[in-house]
Image: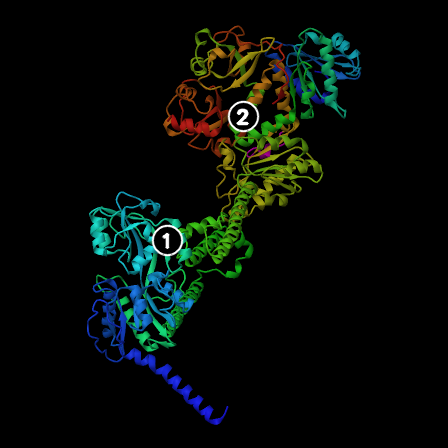
Amino acid sequence: MTRPAKLAAGLFALFALWITCWLPVARAQEPAPEAQPDAQPDAKPTPLPAGTIRFGAGSKGGGFSQTGDALANALEQINAGTRIHVENTGGSCDNVRKLARGEVDAALVQYDVAAEAFAASAVGDHALEDGAQSGWMCELSSAELAGVELQLVAAIDDSAVHVIVRRPVRLDDFSSVGDRPIFVGQLGSGSMETSKVILGAAGLTLDDVNSLPIKNKAAMTAMQNGELLMMLRTTEIGDDAISGLLASGMAGLNALPDSVIERLIDGFPYYRICQIDAHSYPGLEFGVPSVCVSTVVLTARRAGVDALSDEQVGELIDGLRWIEHNPVEGQPPVSVRWRDFAEREPIPLHPGAGLTERRDFAIYWAKVIAALALVGGALVLLRRFLRRKGLLGNPLSGNLEGQLSNPIVPFAGFLLIVVAATVVVWNLEHDSNARVRTLNDSFWEMNMFATGNFDSESLKTSTARVIGAAATIAGLGLLAWFTAALTSILSRDQMRLFRRMRNHIVILNFREEMLQLVRVLRSPGPLRQRSIHVVVSDTLPPRVRAQLTKVRGLTIYQQNPEVPEDLVDLRLPRAARVIVLQGGYHPLRIARAVHHACVRLDPAARIEATKQQHGLGMSPSVHSPALAGDDARGARATVPVTLVEATDGDVADGLFDPFSRWLVPVPARQLADAWLANACVDPSFGELFNDIVSFRDDNSELYTVELSESFHGKTWRELRKLLFTAQARAGIVPIGLYRGHQGRLAYDASDVADSSPQAAIARRLRVNPPLETVLGEGDRVLAFAEDEADLRKVLKSRR
Amino acid sequence: MLHWSPASAGLVDELARTIASVGVNRITCVRDGTAPLAVRQVQGVEVRTLAIDVKPGSDAYPIRLIDDVDIVAARSVIVLPRAGMDEPDSASRLTCAAIRRACGDALGPNVLVEIEDPEAAFEFVGLGVANVFYPGHLRAALLGQACVDLGVFQFIVGLLRGRHHVQSIAVPERLRDGTFADAALSLECDSAGRPMTVIGVAKGRSEGGQPINVVVNPGPRTRLSECVCLMVLVTGEDPLEQAPEQAPEQAPERSNSERPGIQVGA
């Protein structure tokens, strides 16, 4: 290129740049001759002061115009450098066209119309043939939007689609409307465009219905007069006119069918699913599913030049925020947003709005972080304070195993998962998924997921489905953990119950033949839940040991029962009964060891001995013939009631006499001989005896139960009558009394000073007492009953 | 008592004490092997000790039982475990079979067998054994009861020691249409005027008229028309000894020649 040619090209480029930069500014500063409101076609254009924004609102007195006026006022209130000139227009459709033509600099537009216009502009310049119609909303054509890039200043409020139906009609399907008159919106309004889309989602066009071409006010009157079957109104929730109509009882709100909502969102993601909440209108008791569309402030970039500068947009936003904080009475509340007001938001933000959004974002998170830091700091101070006061334990003393077995941990985790999934899924889909319209819907949906009921159809987006799947897997895992922890606790408690060292039964010197004893102790009856501790010798055959290990609640010890030190771990003073069997070790030496372990080696006994120099204590259970060990809660160390399997010679020789206060010899062979002798003279004795001593579910056993005060003074005959006629699970057969002494205890230690507890028990047991025997304090009835609880229940009911 | 040994001396004493009260006055103790016949008195009861030197499984054993001890006429027979044998219960089974052969078609005595292995009880089915007794079960039951309630334990010991008796009495005619509660409330004393308690009923009788299917505490509404007799608990000396012909309405039934079938003792 030659030098003159280069110079000419440079000059041309400078000129072009000047034209590009200056022309839009000049247009913005000077009102365009076309920017005349439709309502005043003949009005002479008035020159606007420099810096004034031409603001497209709506019809005079309409909602858009009121919002425009409020914004103008707000700008004055905040002393903004920018002023707006509110221009009356035909509504959203008209505003988009005026923006495209440069007749206004900013305008209020329903977002569905705006998004459609944006989509049409993106198609490019496709001129329609003569007579051809545009299918875009407002019949916008791509040609008239060519070179125009719509920009979002802010979304400011929401309008919900109201399906108002004459009462008592309920519509599940819009096709059932038929030819009956309906109203879908004022011609040219965004509301009507929305209605068209909704009808389309129901498979209908405007030509398929009998829509009356009337104004909003006339439509309300017609509905009030019962002349309309249905109205579709897109307006803010809580609209006064609709409230009045519903309050009259002539019409009710109908839910938008789910299928329509789904199709609508799929085809036109500029809406979002919302709910007209209960009590928003008179008589509305339940939330009504619907779709919402936002009103946005739009501006445009024409031929590469922004209609508004960043500063102007910033001041507009400030004005809108002022309205947000100072709502105008009678107007819908304003909420300034840039995101999350529609399922999809294709229109880009104006650079000035983007700057404000980023700044707000930064401020918001700075506040959150500051708040978190404050809370964290407060917690640290609180922890330090509590530790100083000794109210907080050392965290290192806890352990992971303990946390794993704590069911609260998985339960809390489950709740956390559900709550987190609820919030995230709701955030992702509440605008587009009719099943998660509200947080409540989302919560229950995620509860289903987390309990294993995954349903891919419930959620629409892949992200939400991934979260749902994660919630399902995590929820199932946590529930399994929770169940395992609970099971562990219960089984541990069960183990603790069976291994507990209180009111337990200790069997010393166990031998193989006494497996039958263990079976008896584990048969249905009062002893079934008692823990059994068996001391075996190393000569016990392994197969017997294996059998013992299968018995529930039985603990095996391999120790020498003649060594007192070996018995200390068995906590003998707290035992309900100690049974000493014949076997490899001598029962007498074992009895001595029991005594020694209780009164010399037991820790409680040693402590007690240092406090008071009392003689040998007796187990309270010796005093009372009732279930062994029930009263073994005294502070003093005691020797438990000990049953010794004795031989005839042992008893005759008085081998165990020194221990008679706490030891009961059971001459098993002698009693076996007695059994044989009785069975010899009476063959039915065996069957009867077996029935009496066996604890089974299908027979009665003998129990003694203390008689309450209400029975004192009554005779044995009266008690017999009361019990014989009582019908419990089976019946009650009283056979005798165990006479009391001074209340609850059967006798005092002084009573047996010259005798033994066993002798006292035998003496006080009265089988078949005289019928006129008067019952007294401490008396216990001896009776056959299905179980002890049965006897107690009957005695309680027969007071 | 078959397969008796001196180790069972206590049983002889206990048996002598018990049978003396029901009018039986002889106990024959049969040892294994050879020994001369010995006779002595225990608590007023004649106790004869003799020996049979043939094995229970042999054909001669039933004959010896008939010839030496007149087994058919015995009121009761106790078969003890043979001492010094690996399988004493098996020997007892052969002994019971020999008793059965010795009795032939006769009803025979009331047979009780003491076993060492509780699982062997069912081997005696069909041999005319009234009670199979396993002492380990009795020990376990006694110790178990002592664990639960010492008062109840004392009662059971009293029952074994003869301080208390369970007897059967016929259902009085006037109570035939009544209930168990009616009988329990109306039958307060025995013929000697001592308090007694109706504790159960028997719902059947063996071939020899002995009460079987005894139910203790059958429930107050049990119809007496469904029962064959009442079971009563009497305390003190055996009333039969005092007044054998008297009972509240009818003398207690003391026939003991029946075979109620296998019963694992205690």
Tell me if A504 is positioned left or right of B34 in this view.
left
Kind of residue sitting beneath label 1: Gly
Kind of residue sitting beneath label 2: Gln
Q: Residue A543: x percent and y percent? A: 70, 36
Main SS of residues in magenta: loop
Same chain for mark 1 and mark 2? The answer is no
User: What subunit carries mark 2?
Assistant: B
Rendered residue at 67%/38% (across/down): A546
Mark 2, residue position: B154
Which residue ends up furthest to the front in the rendered image?
A130
Residue A617 seen in this snapshot: yes
**Vertical position of residue B260 compared to residue A78: above or below:** above
What is the quadrant of residue B256 in the picture? Answer: top right
User: SS of the residue at dot 1?
Assistant: helix
User: Which is closer to the viewer, label 1 or label 2?
Assistant: 1
Q: Residue B141: x percent and y percent? A: 59, 27
Q: Which mark is residue A200?
A: 1
User: SS of the residue at dot 2?
Assistant: helix
**Vertical position of residue B195 compared to residue A541: above or below:** above
Q: Which residues lie in the magenta part?
A: A654-662
Residue B3 seen in this snapshot: no
Give the camera-side residue of B31 and A10: A10
